[in-house]
Image: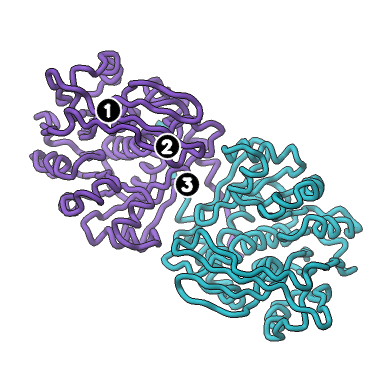
Chain colours: A purple, B cyan
Amino acid sequence: MGKLVIVGSTNIDSIESPFGKVERIVGGSAPFIALAATQFDLDVAIVSVIGEDFPKQYLDLLAARDIDLSALEIVKGGKTFFWKGKYHNDLNSRDTLATDLNVLADFKPVVPNAYTDADVVMLGNLHPNIQLSVINQMTKRPKLIILDTMNFWMDNTLNELLNVIKHIDVLTINDEEARQLTGEYSLVKAAHEIYGMGPKYVVIKKGEHGALLFHKQQVFFAPALPLEEVFDPTGAGDTFAGGFAGFMAATDDTSFENMKKAVIHGSNLASFCVEKFGTERMVNLKREEVNKRLHQFKTLTQFEIELQ
Amino acid sequence: MGKLVIVGSTNIDSIESPFGKVERIVGGSAPFIALAATQFDLDVAIVSVIGEDFPKQYLDLLAARDIDLSALEIVKGGKTFFWKGKYHNDLNSRDTLATDLNVLADFKPVVPNAYTDADVVMLGNLHPNIQLSVINQMTKRPKLIILDTMNFWMDNTLNELLNVIKHIDVLTINDEEARQLTGEYSLVKAAHEIYGMGPKYVVIKKGEHGALLFHKQQVFFAPALPLEEVFDPTGAGDTFAGGFAGFMAATDDTSFENMKKAVIHGSNLASFCVEKFGTERMVNLKREEVNKRLHQFKTLTQFEIELQ
């Protein structure tokens, strides 16, 4: 069985969207990635940190999905990373109202012994030095190292980010960030520029506009499923990355063809994530629902065409 | 052979983009639609108006593509509709620097006798009353009436627009305009709302993010081809509509399956349009180039996936 180790933040989030508000629910890249990845048959461990205030019910939720929590450090007397945000009416932009790093500020990740030979390493959005530390703890070169990041690290720790990117196979990044990182407006040119920084594969996430997978001269595009209801975009990018990483770890095949499937699985799972606040839709997601929507993805995009 | 009649503006455009500027080139919905439609085997006529200042070389270009220009009225002593615009660095937004309606202000479209029984009517972006007048001149209900419009007509002539929309089969509109017309943020909901206004098919154009085709509960998505170079987005939406309408007129099949192909053809042709200023890329476009890129569209979107 494939092994996936995930490093990322574990948050308490308070979120307001045009459709309502929630207070102090579980969030962060690690839980979202792990909940998506466990849709596949594989062993999953989270490397993360929380404080004593983290609600036990959320730990139980993660444990119930057979996520290995042995490397989820609980800091005595500490407070969990807290994020508070408010989405605007179009859900495409948001105001961050609070970012209290708390225990995340001094986080030293420790990869559990059983996972230092993991097949796939998923480096969720975090300080690049924490991401690098996880790579350095691996006793065997993983088949695939995937890194997700955001503009905050480009603005504040660009050298550290460029340093860790050298060691990875797949960079997942959104379209604006790809443009910021490379100075190229064309996403094709941006992806090719990123190859030169290390990654052989580049996934450019475009939110409601889908995702692009680049490898050498090849490109593959997965749309986002057009939805009637979008409640809360929080975690959609991490869910995408978790679906991608989970599928790649569950299948022993790092070919471009297989990675295309991983992109579809990621997009498919992300389409559920946004339908409820936080992780609510993901914790009870059924295989049948996932399969039904995969079928919708095929219907949405597949066509027959004769050349003129 | 299928017959397509197109009503639309014929402009003289001056355009500035981050990649250069051009003065007084041919533009407008009618030429862009017609140049795309003539990629297919069909008879095409333009119903439009120009002034005596319209350069003969551009008339020759259109005639060379076997476009019937008998209903392209030339107003003696009149000046052609002139548009001047400047694109911002991201090419997604632009400033309109001049809009001189000139002869377009009093345009009374006259459908040529040979085209009052056309299979497909393509109503390019114009005053809705002009669009309605073309419908009323048809002696036989066309198999398909397609209408393209924009926010300007929603802002200024909403009642007239709603009146003409009652009589059409396919509305093509961009995502922001679909939201404006319906008050629905979700494009799925917006499309369903538009069904209630008359059209059985809704095409929502998302520019560089592709296009969605809606019919009843069905949805199909065509991406825009990721390009290395985008020079000038002017005419891309019209080129899309022209490819769509041309393919539908050339094939005697108004099924959803065939319309999916029309959306792909439209996206494919639009991908060429933006590579040069104005109509430059479209006037000499070769069948082999078109076919090669259709193949890229398949590679970009087609995947095999097994259910878990």
Amino acid carrying label 1: it is: Phe
Left or right of A201: which side holds B286? right
The spot of residue A65 in percent (x, y) is 30, 20
Residue at 79% from the left image edge and 67% from the top image edge: B105
Chain containing mark 1: A
The spot of residue B94 in percent (x, y) is 54, 62
Amino acid carrying label 3: it is: His
Quick check: do tags 1 and 2 share a chain?
no
CA–CA distance between discs 1 and 3?
29 Å
CA–CA distance between discs 1 and 2?
39 Å
Chain containing mark 2: B
Residue depth check, mark 3 versus mark 2: number of the one nearer the observer: 3
Residue B54 falls in which quadrant of the image? bottom right
Amino acid carrying label 2: it is: Glu
Left or right of A148: which side holds B20? right
Residue depth check, mark 1 versus mark 3: number of the one nearer the observer: 1
Per the image, label 2 sits on a secondary structure element best described as loop
Depth order, front residue of A114/B17: B17
- Discs 1, 3 touching: Cβ within 8 Å: no
Depth order, front residue of A34/A13: A13
Q: Is residue A292 above or below residue B114?
A: above
Chain containing mark 3: A
Is residue A31 visible in the rendered image? The answer is yes
Per the image, label 1 sits on a secondary structure element best described as strand
Query: What residue is disc 3 on?
Result: A209
Mark 1 residue crowding within 10 angstroms, few (<14) / some (14–19) / many (20+) = many
Query: What residue is disc 1 on?
Result: A82
Find residue B306 and name its label.
2
Residue at 88% from the left image edge and 58% from the top image edge: B138
Does label 1 or label 3 sit earlier along the sequence? Answer: 1
Left or right of A92: which side holds A113? left
Depth order, front residue of B235/A135: B235
